[in-house]
Amino acid sequence: MLDALFGNVALLLLSAGLVLMALEALSPGAHLIVIGIALVGAGLIGVLFPVSSPFILAGLTLLIGVVAAYIYNEFDFYGGKGTAQTSDSDTLAGSTGYVTETVTTRSGEVKLDDGGFAPYYSARTTSGSIEEGEEVIVLDPGGGNILTVESLGAIGEDEIDRALASNASETEGETGTETEAEAETKTDETTETTESDTDSSTTSQAADTEPQTGTDPTNSIDESVTETEKSG
């Protein structure tokens, strides 16, 4: 059977594609679905329409892969345009869901609201147990293997209120800082305007004073004529 599999490139591509698609279902967000679709598509074409040249199959794989990648990005199957919600296990922190199998300190299972194609995860809690149907929040993604969760009902309202109050204080602080900065800017602008007006007034007064202190040519001529008449 293995000889037949490796001797038939199309069948090999088909098998590899199915394996990758299965892995994507188990670990969503790894983008294996794109490669899987490309291999399955090329493999199916090769099986239905026998192709002797492996280069043709390679070209088909590339073409189908490009189309699959475009559709995958365009339709955003995992939600959250432009973000791979489960491609990085760290993004699971803070996610919410509910318990599908009683969670204890050693075992359990939860279903996350934003879990992709396979939203079920093994989970455990730090203490006690969480019964089926209870809403939970992920505290530690644990690398995506075993999540550490806590019941939303067990999280005290005081903690939530403190968190909200802290966020509100930070927002008010930022707003106050911005207001002070704006006030300082307006004060600087007013000072600059006042100085500019003062300089303009000083220049105008100097210009008005110069003609008054100068010698009038007409008066000089009259005085010369008077002196000539007297001497005559």
Image (cartoon, helix red, strand yellow):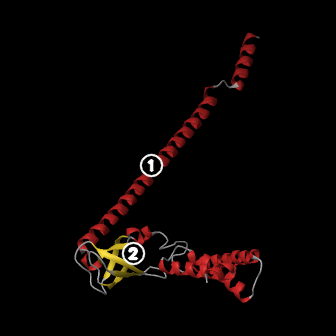
Depth order, front residue of 2/213: 2
User: Where in the figure is residue 110, as x and y percent of width and height?
Assistant: 36, 81
Q: Residue at x 37, y 69 (%)?
A: 142
Against 168, is 103 above or below? below
Asked if residue 78 can be seen in this view, the reply is: no
Depth order, front residue of 173/200: 173
Against 204, is 24 above or below? below
Q: Residues within 10 Å of mark 1 (few under 14, many from 20)?
A: few
Q: Residue at x 43, y 49 (%)?
A: 184
Q: Residues within 10 Å of mark 2 (few under 14, many from 20)?
A: some
Tell which residue pokes out farthest to the bottom in this image: 48
Q: Quadrant of residue 20?
A: bottom right
Q: Quadrant of residue 45?
A: bottom right
Depth order, front residue of 41/103: 41
The three-letter amino acid code for the residue at tag 1 is Thr
Left or right: 142, with 29 as reference point = left
User: Where in the figure is residue 109, as x and y percent of width and height?
Assistant: 35, 81
Left or right: 85, with 56 as reference point = left
Q: Which residue is mark 1?
A: 187
